[in-house]
């Protein structure tokens, strides 16, 4: 499969699109990520083979499996907290969102928990 960061980005995007639209299709992922439909198609097949997503045969809607949802929620939480923390210390919003995407995959669990603790103190 694709490396973890890429997989996590796809799963996170599926979660975000589901929250925003109530459903997710391959074209929605392609449009929101700026990738080609064939690239998304390959990634979707791999995610499905790994048991991280399911695709409804009638609607072609993509849903996260329990395991896929767990991964997506973990990454999305990191993204939201890190980007919010960066904004709170004066980083412009667009830069904070971009940097959070870079940071969210590489932090250890211990470091993220400490960041989360500090962030909750300043809220």
Image: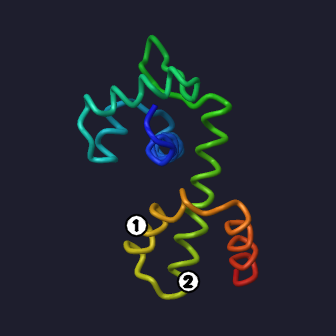
Compared with 79, 29 (above or below) is above
Q: Secondary structure at mark 2?
A: helix
- Badge 2 or badge 1: first in the primary sequence: 2
Side of 110 relative to 85 (left or right): right
Q: Position of residue 17 (x, y in %)?
A: 46, 43
Q: Secondary structure at mark 1?
A: helix
Residue located beneath label 2 in the image: 88
Residue at horizontal 68%, vertical 73%? 115
Residue at horizontal 68%, vertical 77%? 119
Side of 25 relative to 71 (left or right): left
Identify the colour scheme used: rainbow
Other residues around mark 1 within 10 Å, as few (<14) / some (14–19) / many (≥20): few
Q: Is residue 20 visible?
A: no
Distance from Cα at disc 2 to Cα at disc 1: 15 Å
Residue at horizontal 57%, vertical 63%? 80
Residue located beneath label 1 in the image: 98
Name the image quarter holding residue 116: bottom right
Q: Marks 2 and 1: which is nearer the front? A: 1
Q: Position of residue 78 (x, y in %)?
A: 60, 60
Compared with 78, 89 (above or below) is below
* Cβ–Cβ under 8 Å for marks 2 and 1: no
Q: Which mark is residue 21?
A: none
Q: Position of residue 33 (x, y in %)?
A: 33, 47
- Give the quarter of the figure containing the C terminus: bottom right
Other residues around mark 2 within 10 Å, as few (<14) / some (14–19) / many (≥20): some
Q: Is residue 71 visible?
A: yes
Q: Position of residue 56 (x, y in %)?
A: 49, 17
């Amino acid at each position: 499969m694709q490396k973890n960061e890429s997989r996590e980005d796809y799963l996170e995007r599926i979660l975000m699109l589901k929250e925003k639209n109530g459903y997710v299709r391959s074209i929605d992922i392609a449009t929101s990520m700026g990738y080609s439909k064939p690239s998304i198609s390959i990634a979707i097949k791999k995610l499905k083979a790994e048991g991280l997503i399911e695709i409804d045969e009638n609607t072609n809607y993509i849903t996260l499996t329990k395991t896929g949802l767990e991964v997506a929620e973990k990454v999305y939480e990191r993204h939201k907290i890190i980007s919010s923390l960066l904004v709170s210390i004066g980083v412009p919003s667009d830069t904070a969102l971009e940097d959070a995407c870079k940071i969210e995959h590489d932090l250890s669990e211990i470091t993220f928990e400490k960041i989360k603790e500090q962030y909750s103190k300043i809220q």
